[in-house]
Image (tube, rainbow, N blue to C red):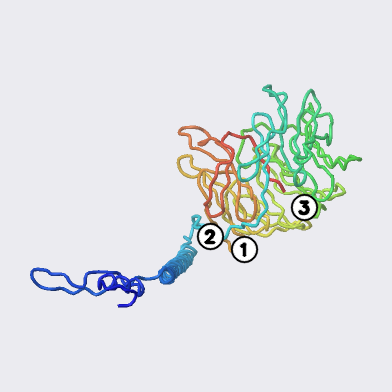
Amino acid sequence: MENGDSNPRTRLQSLAEEINIEERPHATEVDGEVSRIKPTKKLSIKKIIFYGGIVLLLILLVVVTSVYFILEGKKAQDKNTDEVQSSTGVETSSGSNTETGSGTNAIDEEAEMKKIAYLYEGNVWVINEDGTGKKKITDADESPESYYSNPQWKEVGVVSYSRCLGGECTIYSYDLEETKQVIERKFASSGIISFGWAHESDRLAYFYTDDNGARYLDLWDGESLDNLDSWTEPIYGRGGSFDDGNSISFSSDDNYILLFYTIGVPGQDSIIIYSEDGDEVISIGSEDDSGFPLSTFPNWLNDEEIIYKADSTLYQHPVVSSVAKILTSSFSGYDLHLSPDQSRLSYWLFGDNGITNSYYYDLGDDMVVKIIDDMVDLEWLNNNSLVGRTTEPIDGAMVPFEYKGLATVDIDGRNFKIIVPENIVSFSVER
């Protein structure tokens, strides 16, 4: 043999190594019979990687396909659910449809984060609508004489408030970015009832009293002062009502100033609109013989019209006309607030056993939609979410609930979140 190798087994082993065949016995004997075993070929590393990669790609394809069909099925289910929910309105005695929040309204995720100013233990605080950035910006001590009041927004990032000490009242503004407080107006007064800022100027309208109980409405532009109106009649003594309120607001073009004030004087109008020159344009809603308001909670619908509630009726009233349009003839509710796009009106009512119910009235669809229970005084953060005070029922009390804190909620009743757990006095949303 070649290479002088005459051992057959050695030669066989050498050949097996050359052709990559695993050396195995060519035959084994089992129970007297010979079983022949074929040699097994070994897979190379490259082939193992190749086939393994194919298997992984197939698995990935199966997973992606499964996820796709799951998501498509969920979309179809949500669509069907929304269609069913949007058709479940229940006819009420007033002829409007009432729905519970069902998630059928898209939430405006692009709306800018608003800040909220609120009054707690005599101090003004500011917090973001998501509950972050909580900050106290005033320095009142525990004595009520040092307390601040009337938090309002002058503009984005600038909050105003007032304080009265020793027969003198001051209206301040605080710039959150510059962390700086300035005095806007200081004058002799026993108390500020309300004030409001123009949208595009530094004009400030404020309503206040003197030591004799007389009431005045002044307009200040930073340099000159105009008295728009005054009243000297004594205030009629009576108990409070959830229809009571007070506010000052400018039309969006700043051409008109709206004063809403329920003071308990029989025959006194509770809604008065003035021109920018200080002339009275229209007066609405005389109080009844007991001094309770007949017309309440006015809101600017546009530059030339307001809406308000009177005698369980919701009216739309042009500024330059004495004729009002009835929007709905069976309406009750407190603390009315229009959404930024003027399409919905939020309000609340008493429910059963001290539970409060919050709703919005859709002006376009003439539909009443329930938002959530145990919330009142809802103001709009944007067209699809609100902030308001939470309540808790009290058995046997004259007022069957107590205020608890401040919370946000979407118009479909979802995403309820308490952002201030303490019992606040009042609040204002950044405009």
Residue 336 in view in this figure: yes
Residue found at x 45% / y 40%: 353
State how far apart marks 2 and 3 are (Cα): 29 Å
Rendering quarter of residue 40: bottom left
Horizontal and vertical percent position of residue 123: 69, 31
Say whether disc 1 or disc 3 marks the residue closer to the N-terminus. Answer: 3
**Percent position (x, y) of residue 60?**
44, 67
- As displayed, is residue 218 above or below residue 23? above
Q: Nearer the viewer, mark 2 or mark 3?
A: 3
From the viewer's perspective, is residue 82 above or below residue 188? below
Identify the image quadrant of the N terminus: bottom left
Q: Which residue is nearer to you in this view: 162 or 16?
A: 16
Q: Residue under circle 2?
A: 96
Query: Viewed as shown, does residue 198 lie left or right of 90?
Result: right
The residue identified by callout 3 is: 251
The amino acid on which the numbered mark 2 sits, given as a three-letter code, is: Ser
